[in-house]
């Protein structure tokens, strides 16, 4: 995907009350990209979004938008619009007046505004809602109005701050498809903030995993899921078995006293590493047929699959399978060498060891 | 606790309400609608047309409107600034406005008399700069100052409360959509603070229109308000019928003003006052 860079965040740092929220953050956002900032609360993702929107001025660093430095530009002068977490609709205006707010300020004609309102309402599947009071609408409908209100201004970038956080699961999944469809129809850049890894993986072109003010990893959803760079990313994206291991030599790692064949090279010899094995990559078999033997200790039905805990070599392995094994049953565990992820141990607990330049 | 026992808990209040609200109202209605011989008459109500009474009512309306307006002009910007300040700082300033209310109302008005008198503190300070002396006491100006002083907190609080409740995200959203500071204020903050303004107006205007103690102390006998007239009918002339009749007229007047206000108060913030 060759896309033109649109926004450059250069060496952004920000602290609140002496607490560092962002530390030397570098990030390039491209045209037409659906980029998701993903991380736990307090990781700096919302601050990053508010810096883009102009509501927070960074202590250090520059925001370059379309070649221009907008670091100190007021929010109302920026060619991007925000969809807020709690929708933030104007309670004293009806739906049409809410959507028209930005257009009236920019001095558009009544006819133009009328056309835009009906176009936007059609886009978000809420035709005929013009005269409704936004406070009388459901959360999902309010969110659609908030999106309509933002996109009628034809921003180059739409910023979305956990917009689906307040919706129930079913609606959230529907809205995920809608957002992707909207983004493709409008052909603009979406910068999306969420702590929900499933949301991030479903919708994004690029996922930026953040923790404690640093970018941990940046890449396509497949990259992030299949090739986590460190234990934090592996743990945050989906369920994982993360185990201490020692890299004996290239393509051979020792975990819990057992040697596993893997595909990773270049870690040196006898190097302590983190090993990640996804629960769906562990294959259960008859005792003695796999790499490890163990006993099932727990079984939960999850709908799509069963989730089991298997005690083997002193570690409780999380295993997902469509076949149920009863607690107490003796099983073996097997894992394809390709599905063993080897990661360097982080330099510190903060996982700040990731160099953002790697992704350029 | 079952419902019957719970109902018992309202007993003390019911006794209070009957003794101090319902009975007095019925008595005012009875006296207002009868004459000395006890027969029905509307004369006591129509007495408002008497030039002295009509003038007093008119003066009351003007002074109540004036003090409401001045309070609003002082309170609104203050409430706006306070609501934008951090919690602790604004709390302290609000506290400063509340503090005088802990002191007896009469004492405060009498203190004001000392300040405003011809040989009072204000004129002493002004005289030091070669200004004055100003003859403020026993005039409408003195009453106005007293009423604004007395009722200002009742204007500040509801406006401040409503402004604090305005969702900061809504203001951010307006800026995000291109609104500059002036547009944000005119199209978002002002309309959203209107319920507080209406509450404030009601809380200053209603007591203001029937005010007579401040007028007595700071206005002397120079200014006669409808409250003074009613007071005198009860306490000096001992004409309870006329006093009650004029009270009913005043009440009707207040009801009409409230009805007008409520028409504009869509959100119902002001309705909790009565």
Image (tube, coloured by chain):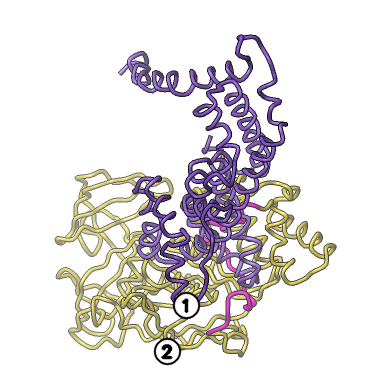
Chain colours: A yellow, B purple
Q: Nearer the viewer, residue A137 or A38?
A: A137
What segment is highlighted magenta in the picture? A72-92
Disc 1, SS: loop
For residue B215, side relative to residue A240 (left or right): right
Instruction: Answer yes or no: is residue B45 visible.
Output: yes
Task: Tell me, yes or no, whether the highlighted magenta stretch contains residue A89.
Answer: yes
Task: Tell me, yes or no, whether the highlighted magenta stretch contains residue B84.
Answer: no
Q: Mark 1 sits on what residue?
A: B129
Q: Position of residue A66 (x, y in %)?
A: 62, 86
Which secondary structure type mostly characterizes the magenta part of the structure?
loop
In terms of image quadrants, where is residue A104? Answer: bottom right
Q: Position of residue B158 (x, y in %)?
A: 50, 50
Residue pictured at 60% horizontal, 47% vertical:
B64
Q: Position of residue A81 (x, y in %)?
A: 61, 70
Subunit of mark 2?
A
CA gap, disc 2 and disc 1: 71 Å
Subunit of mark 1?
B
Residue placed furthest toward the right = A111
Neighbourhood count class around disc 1 (C-alpha, 10 Å): few under 14, some 14–19, many 20 upward? few
Residue pictured at 22% horizontal, 50% vertical:
A296
Q: Mark 2 sits on what residue?
A: A357
Residue pictured at 37% horizontal, 65% vertical:
B89
Q: Nearer the viewer, residue A240 or B26?
A: B26
For residue A212, side relative to residue B149 (left or right): left
> In the figure, A67 relative to B21: above or below?
below
Q: Position of residue A78 (x, y in %)?
A: 62, 78
Q: Nearer the viewer, residue B155 or A164?
A: B155
For residue A261, side relative to residue A29 (left or right): left
């Amino acid at each position: 995907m060759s896309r033109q860079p649109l926004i450059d965040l250069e060496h952004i740092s920000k602290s609140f009350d002496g607490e560092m929220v962002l530390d030397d953050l570098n990030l390039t956002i491209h045209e037409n990209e659906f980029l998701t900032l993903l991380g736990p609360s307090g990781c700096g993702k919302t601050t990053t979004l508010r810096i883009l929107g102009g509501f927070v001025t960074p202590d250090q660093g520059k925001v370059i938008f379309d070649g221009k430095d907008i670091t100190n530009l007021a929010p109302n002068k920026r060619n991007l619009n925000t969809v807020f977490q709690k929708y933030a609709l104007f309670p004293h205006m009806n739906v049409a007046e809410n959507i028209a707010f930005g257009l009236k300020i920019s001095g558009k004609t009544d006819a133009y505004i009328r056309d835009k309102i009906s176009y936007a309402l059609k886009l978000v599947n809420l035709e005929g809602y013009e005269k409704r009071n936004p406070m009388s609408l459901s959360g999902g409908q309010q969110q659609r109005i908030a999106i309509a209100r933002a996109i009628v201004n034809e921003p180059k970038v739409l910023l979305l701050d956990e917009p689906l956080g307040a919706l129930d699961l079913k609606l959230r999944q529907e809205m995920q498809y809608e957002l992707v469809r909207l983004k493709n129809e409008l052909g603009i850049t979406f910068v999306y903030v969420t702590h929900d890894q499933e949301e991030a993986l479903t919708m994004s072109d690029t996922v930026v995993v953040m923790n404690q003010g640093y970018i941990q990893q940046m890449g396509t959803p497949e990259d992030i899921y299949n090739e986590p760079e460190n234990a934090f990313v592996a743990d945050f994206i989906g369920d994982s078995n993360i185990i201490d291991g020692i890299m004996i030599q290239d393509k051979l790692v020792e975990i819990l006293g057992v040697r596993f064949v893997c595909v990773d090279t270049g870690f040196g010899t006898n190097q302590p590493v983190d090993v990640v094995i996804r629960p769906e990559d562990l294959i259960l078999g008859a005792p003695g047929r796999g790499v490890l033997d163990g006993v099932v200790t727990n079984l939960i039905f999850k709908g799509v699959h069963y989730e089991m805990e298997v005690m083997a070599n002193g570690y409780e392995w999380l295993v997902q399978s469509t076949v149920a094994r009863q607690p107490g049953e003796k099983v073996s565990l097997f894992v394809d060498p390709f599905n063993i992820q080897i990661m360097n141990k982080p330099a510190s607990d903060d996982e700040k060891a990731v160099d953002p330049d790697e992704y350029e | 606790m079952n419902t019957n026992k719970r109902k018992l808990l309202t007993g003390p209040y019911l006794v209070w309400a009957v003794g101090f609200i319902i009975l007095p109202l019925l008595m005012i209605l009875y006296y207002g609608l009868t004459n000395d011989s006890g027969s029905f008459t509307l004369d006591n109500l129509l007495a408002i047309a008497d030039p002295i009474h009509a003038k007093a009512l008119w003066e009351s309306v003007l002074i109540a409107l004036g003090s409401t307006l001045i309070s609003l002009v002082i309170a609104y910007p203050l409430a706006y600034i306070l609501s934008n300040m951090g919690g602790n700082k604004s709390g302290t300033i609000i506290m400063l406005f509340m503090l005088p209310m802990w002191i007896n109302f009469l004492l405060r008005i009498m203190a004001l008399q000392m300040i405003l008198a011809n040989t009072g503190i204000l004129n002493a300070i002004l005289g030091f700069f070669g200004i004055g002396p100003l003859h403020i006491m026993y005039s409408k100006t003195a009453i106005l100052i007293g009423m604004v002083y007395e009722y200002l907190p009742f204007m500040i609080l509801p406006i401040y409360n409503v402004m604090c409740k305005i969702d900061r995200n809504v203001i951010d959203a307006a800026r995000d959509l291109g609104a500059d500071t002036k547009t944000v204020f005119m199209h978002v903050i002002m309309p959203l603070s209107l319920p507080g303004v209406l509450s404030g107006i009601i809380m200053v205007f209603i007591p203001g229109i029937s005010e007579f103690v401040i007028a007595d102390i700071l206005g002397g006998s120079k200014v006669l308000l409808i409250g003074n007239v009613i007071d005198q009918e009860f306490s000096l002339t001992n004409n309870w019928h006329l006093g009650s009749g004029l009270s009913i007229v005043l009440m009707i007047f207040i009801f009409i003003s409230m009805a007008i206000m409520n028409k504009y108060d869509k959100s119902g913030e002001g309705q909790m006052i009565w």
